[in-house]
Amino acid sequence: MNKQSKLAVLQSFAAGKRSFVWLAILPLALVAAGMLTGCKTQISQTAALKEQAAMAGELTRTNSELIKFKEGDVLKITFPSSPTFDTTQQVRRDGRITMSLVGDVDVVGMTPSELEKKLLDLYATQLTSKLVTVEVVSSAIPIYVTGMVLRPGKIMSDHPLTALGAVMEAGGFDFNTANPKDVVVIRREGNIMKNYHLNLRDELKGKQSEPFFLKPYDIVYVPQRFSMF
C-alpha cells in the first residue's frame, strides 16, 4: 500500500472515530438539554403559581378592607385558642354586638381587620394565642314598606336598595290610589325620627335624579293620592 493510500485510510478512520464520538455524545446532550428545559419550565410554573397566590392574597385583603359592618350584618367571630368565646351575632340597631366577658362592642363602620385588632386588645389577658377571625355570614338589612303598595310589609335585602327599589320589591305602586310624587322615608337618626320626601314619579318617568339609598330599618311610606271625589 502506498503512502497516499495509507493516508486516505487514516483520514477515513479518524473521521469515523469522530462520528462515533459525536453519536455517543448526542443522546447525552439531548437529555441534558431536556433536563434544563424541564427545570426552567418547572421554575417558571412555580414562580407563576407563587405570583397567582400573592395576587389572590392581596385581592382577599383588599376585599376584606372594603367591607364595613352595618346594622343587620351577621358576624361570625372565632377564637382558635379559646373556642368558648366563639359567637355568631347580628349587629343591632345601636350598632353593637355583645361579647362574653367584655360586654357591648361598637362595630358599625369597622372593617374585619379593625374589629379583629379591637377584640385582641379586649381579650388580651384571656387568650393564649393572639389570633381571632371575623367574617360576615350574611348582610341582609330589614326595610319596611307601607301605604299604597301592592304587598306592604318587611323586606330583607342583601344588596344596596333605593326607595324606588323597595317599592318595587313590595309589588310596586297601587296606581289606583298611590301618590308617588310625595313618598316619605322615615329614618331614625340617633334619638330623632327624620322624614325625607321623595318624588318617585320623576324617577319612574326616567328623569335623572340622585338615587336615595335606604338604611337598615328605614320605613318607606307611599301616601294615598288626594281626590275630590
Image (spheres, rainbow, N blue to C red):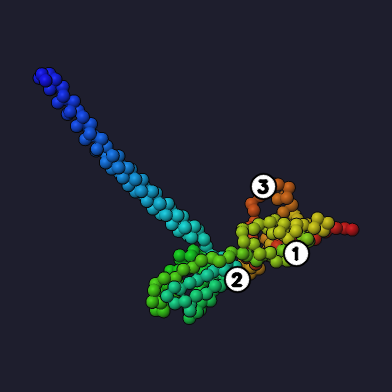
Name the mark nearer the viewer: 1 or 2: 1
| Residue located 67% across and 60% down the image | 196
| Secondary structure type for disc 2 | loop
Q: Which residue is mark 1?
A: 152
Kind of residue indicated by mark 1: Pro
Kind of residue indicated by mark 2: Arg
| Residue located 75% across and 55% down the image | 181
Q: Quadrant of the C terminus?
A: bottom right
Image height of 50 relative to 103, above or below: above
How far across and how far down the image is residue 16, in percent?
A: 21, 29
| Secondary structure type for disc 3 | loop
User: Which disc is residue 82 wearing?
Assistant: none
- The tag earlier along the polypeptide, 2 or 3, is 2
In the rendered image, is residue 166 in sight?
yes
Image height of 206 relative to 115, above or below: above
The local crowd at label 1, few if under 14, some if 14 to 19, many if 20 or more residues have their Cα within 10 Å, is some
User: Which disc is residue 93 wearing?
Assistant: 2
How far across and how far down the image is residue 114, in percent?
A: 46, 66
How far across and how far down the image is residue 48, in percent?
A: 39, 49
How far across and how far down the image is residue 131, in percent?
A: 41, 70
Name the mark nearer the viewer: 2 or 3: 2
